[in-house]
């Protein structure tokens, strides 16, 4: 049975098999990479290679399981990005952290040749086959479609084809769709393409919105029902966490805590703690304490880091979420009176 369709025991598909959502007691990282290879001329650091970095990745996840009860990682390395589900299964087994794999196509500069030669129907069938039978030559099935990308205000023709295919595959299989926007730009256009197929907005997460200093866009996406991913937390060379904090608190104040997903998008080996980077735990060690200091309580943090990603993966609307989920109005009231850094600058 597809997720979110009324089964009494809901589960998500991980690299080691179905995981009952009731067993996810700790936080979820909503957008990460544990193995990826996006190297090209002039950028040889854009990789996490199993032979060179797998042990460090595994150790980091295990330490976060012990320190912060990390329960699940949504791993969004898709077709053409150098992924391997067998490696993800080993990392999951050895770290004790559940890992959910993805399928789809990234933005156009990284499209494999299969994209240029195919129409949306053929691309859709490729995704459905992988979702139903397994990724590559394995029986390991993905649990989400993403990170499906574009790199401008509007998707290119090739990007529109892969977004359309992702939506059709989602409608057929019951999976949800997570996107990549280049520097946060183009989310509304992605949403238009995806929902034009009939895919409901609450089954879509628009990525990298913490890189876009446009609170009105964030509110527009959230009001549509889509998830707004603040998923590059700690990448200070793109935007400061102070800016992310201001943008996130504005979205919470507007009443949209139930639309937020949080993560760090570790996508190159220099981000690993072993190499002096912020690591997968930056969200827990640095950003969430700052949120708490700004007046966000633990219930809202649990909503953003656990209940929201589970609801996104299982296709549940906010009205069908667990009774302990705060309403949007309550979520806004939690922080509306707080004076956080930069509040007046919105």
Image (spheres, helix red, strand yellow):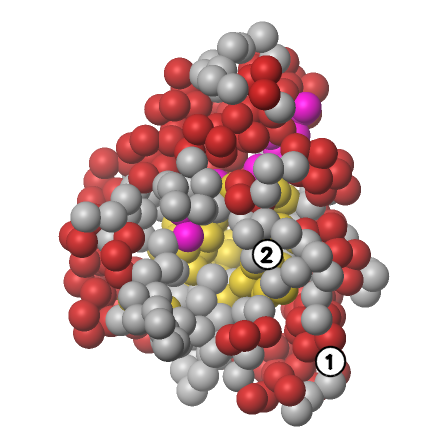
Residue 19 visible? The answer is: no
Q: Nearer the viewer, residue 339 or 140?
A: 339
Extent of the magenta region: 254-265
Depth check, mark 2 against mark 1: the one in front is 2
Which percent across, then down, holds residue 20?
A: 47, 51
Based on the picture, tell me whether residue 35 belongs to the magenta stretch.
no
Q: Residue furthest top?
A: 337
Residue at the (73%, 50%) spot, across then down: 188
Residue at the (40%, 71%) spot, across then down: 38
Residue at the (44%, 28%) spot, across then down: 242
Which percent across, then down, holds residue 158?
A: 68, 77
Q: Nearer the viewer, residue 272 or 345?
A: 345
Residue at the (55%, 30%) spot, across then down: 248
Based on the picture, tell me whether residue 258 belongs to the magenta stretch.
yes
Which percent across, then down, holds residue 260?
A: 57, 37
Q: In the figure, 124 relative to 13: above or below?
A: below
Which residue is denoted by mark 2 in the rendering? 181
Label 2 SS = strand
Choose the circle earlier in sequence order: 2 or 1: 1
Q: Residues within 10 Å of mark 2 (few under 14, many from 20)?
A: many
Label 1 SS = helix
Q: In the figure, 190 relative to 164: above or below?
A: above
Is the C terminus in the top left, top right, bottom left or bottom right quadrant?
A: top right
Is the N terminus in the top left, top right, bottom left or bottom right quadrant?
A: bottom right
State yes or no: discs 2 and 1 in contact (Cβ < 8 Å): no
Which residue is denoted by mark 1 in the rendering? 120
């Amino acid at each position: 049975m597809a997720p979110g369709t009324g089964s009494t025991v809901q589960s998500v598909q991980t690299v080691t098999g179905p995981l009952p959502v009731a067993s996810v007691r700790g936080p979820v990282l909503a957008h990460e990479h544990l193995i990826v290879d996006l190297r090209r001329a002039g950028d040889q650091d854009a990789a996490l290679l199993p032979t060179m970095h797998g042990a460090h990745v595994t150790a980091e996840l295990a330490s976060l399981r012990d320190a912060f009860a990390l329960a699940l990682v949504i791993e969004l390395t898709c077709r053409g990005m150098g992924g391997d589900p067998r490696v993800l299964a080993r990392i999951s087994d050895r770290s004790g952290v559940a890992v959910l794999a993805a399928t789809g196509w990234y933005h156009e500069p990284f499209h494999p040749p299969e994209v240029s030669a195919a129409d949306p129907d053929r691309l859709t069938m490729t995704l459905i086959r992988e979702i139903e039978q397994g990724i590559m030559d394995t029986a390991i099935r993905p649990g989400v479609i993403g990170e499906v990308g574009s790199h401008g205000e509007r998707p290119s023709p090739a990007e529109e084809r892969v977004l359309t295919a992702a939506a059709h595959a989602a409608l057929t299989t019951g999976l949800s769709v997570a996107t990549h926007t280049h520097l946060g730009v183009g989310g509304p256009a992605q949403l238009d393409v995806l929902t034009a197929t009939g895919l409901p907005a609450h089954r879509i997460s628009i990525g990298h919105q913490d890189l876009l200093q446009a609170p009105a866009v964030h509110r527009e996406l959230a009001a549509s029902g889509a998830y707004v991913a603040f998923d590059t937390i700690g990448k200070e060379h793109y935007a400061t966490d102070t800016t992310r904090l201001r943008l996130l608190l504005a979205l919470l104040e507007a009443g949209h805590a139930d639309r937020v997903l949080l993560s760090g998008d570790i996508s190159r080996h220099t981000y690993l703690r072993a190499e002096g980077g912020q690591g997968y735990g930056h969200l827990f060690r640095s950003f969430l304490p700052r949120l708490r200091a700004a007046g966000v309580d633990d219930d809202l943090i649990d909503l953003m880091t656990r209940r929201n990603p589970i609801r996104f993966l299982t296709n549940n609307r906010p009205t069908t979420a667990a009774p302990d989920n705060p309403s949007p109005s309550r979520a806004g009231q939690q922080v509306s009176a707080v004076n956080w850094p930069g509040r007046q600058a919105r």
